[in-house]
Amino acid sequence: MAKNQNVSLSVVRRLPRYHRFLGELMQNGVHRISSRELADIMGLTASQIRQDLNCFGGFGQQGYGYNVETLYHEISRILGLDQKLRTILIGAGNLGRAIATHIEFESRGFSLVGVFDKSSSVIGSSVGGMTVRSMDELAAFCKQEEPVVAVLCIPKDSAQVLADQLVELGIRAFWNFSHYDFAVSHKDVVVENVHMGDSLMTLSYCVHDMMDGESIEEL
Amino acid sequence: MAKNQNVSLSVVRRLPRYHRFLGELMQNGVHRISSRELADIMGLTASQIRQDLNCFGGFGQQGYGYNVETLYHEISRILGLDQKLRTILIGAGNLGRAIATHIEFESRGFSLVGVFDKSSSVIGSSVGGMTVRSMDELAAFCKQEEPVVAVLCIPKDSAQVLADQLVELGIRAFWNFSHYDFAVSHKDVVVENVHMGDSLMTLSYCVHDMMDGESIEEL
DNA sequence: TAGATTGTTAATCGATTAACAATC
DNA sequence: TAGATTGTTAATCGATTAACAATC
């Protein structure tokens, strides 16, 4: 039924934001919303919202708008949030521990089943109710537990070395926090990069751009 | 001299990635590179690289290409990495502490000058060589130290409440890790959102999309 | 029914790619 | 000089916005 053939990444990246706003509307007891109202709240155009949603099907009703609960659940389904992709996290340093404890994997379509590190100083310690395992156990663990997703919270060089090995062990998707650039990567493997350093540098540019604009005051 | 008038955000977001690859080339002792070679390494087109760079000036030389060191330093300058924007971090929970210790602010144009939290259980503790301050000290601290950037590692509701107050105190830019959506925000204030939850949900979609494609095997 | 709002097609806008003259 | 590669203009592609007939 779903007509999600080749939906562009631009559209897909907006879905979680729709999901977030619709969840909030639900909490506020709003049951019905038009594309125009939602557009005003989210700072988009009504056209764009209707175009985006119609990539996946006609969820609205002419003359009425959209039912908030229905749309929320449809988007949940489209994103696959009802699934539980078995996930391992590699690198239990500052960042890895924060992500393991801070991120709600379960409500986002994932299930964190193992945490690994190479350093004996953290192996055996507890992170988010999970015992950190040695990298030596990785292969056996993957054979037994069959995780499909790996969260990489390790330095660039380790990521580069580990990537191929993880694909060999059955990993099909990476949530990559390392500075290693997966851009040119394996076929049939999905990579989502979270390059915080890049994000911060972009902010730096924007701050200076804004401040320059102030002093010169162009026409 | 710089002709960076209204450079699109698409271009700006590619600059940190150029910076990263050029830094690596430098480390590998490469002194000269053509747009074609760089494009091959980065998985872009040579046209795009030349277009991007020419938003800021002609850094290359016909028949030769680009000098790696020169280009690296030019991009550093364009991004403002030589500056040190005074920055405070709010929220010393799991994520806040990880960001304070894990992110290299100094090499990215920022200088972390204060960490704040409202919880007495972390106030006074040390994070990345800094003592966590009480939120009660925030106003006085801002008056004295004049930070311009705030990193928000706090829950959505706190962020919503705090945002206006921080702008009042002179904050001009936010690096936002909260689920609060700054999209429709103050004028003359820059916001860079790092919505990890959205990123993870996007990954969920992509994984299912890839796996669906496998079983159906479409023409 | 009349009013409202969708789904969808057409028009516009912006970003990417191709082409090539300029020039090192 | 001849070869290579840029800077820049033109062509293409994709994404966003506008318009409107369909319909609840």
Image (cartoon, coloured by chain):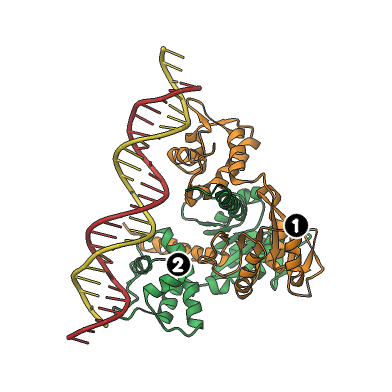
Chain colours: A orange, B green, C yellow, D red
Q: Secondary structure at mark 1?
A: loop
Q: Are marks 2 and 1 in contact (CB under 8 Å)?
A: no
The image shows residue A150, relative to residue B213, as above or below, that is: below
Seen from the viewer's position, the closer of residues A31 and B110 is A31
Query: What residue is shown at x 38% (from left), y 66% (from top)?
Result: B45
Q: Nearer the viewer, mark 2 or mark 1?
A: 2
Q: Earlier in the sequence, mark 2 or mark 1?
A: 2
Where residue B147 sits in the image (x, y, percent)?
57, 65
Checking the image for residue B119, the label placed there is 1
Residue denoted by label 2? B43
Checking the image for residue B205, the label placed there is none
Give amino acid for label 2.
Gly
Query: What residue is shown at x 50% (from left), y 33% (from top)?
Result: A58
The image shows residue D21, relative to residue B11, as above or below, that is: above
Query: How dense is the environment of label 2, judged by Cα within 10 Å: few (below 14), some, or many (20 and up)?
Result: few
Query: What residue is shown at x 34% (from left), y 68% (from top)?
Result: B54
Task: Say whether residue D3 is left or right of residue C15.
Answer: left
Give amino acid for label 1.
Ser
Q: Is residue B146 visible?
A: no
Q: Secondary structure at mark 2?
A: loop
Q: Chain of mark 1?
A: B
Where residue B139 sits in the image (x, y, percent)?
63, 59
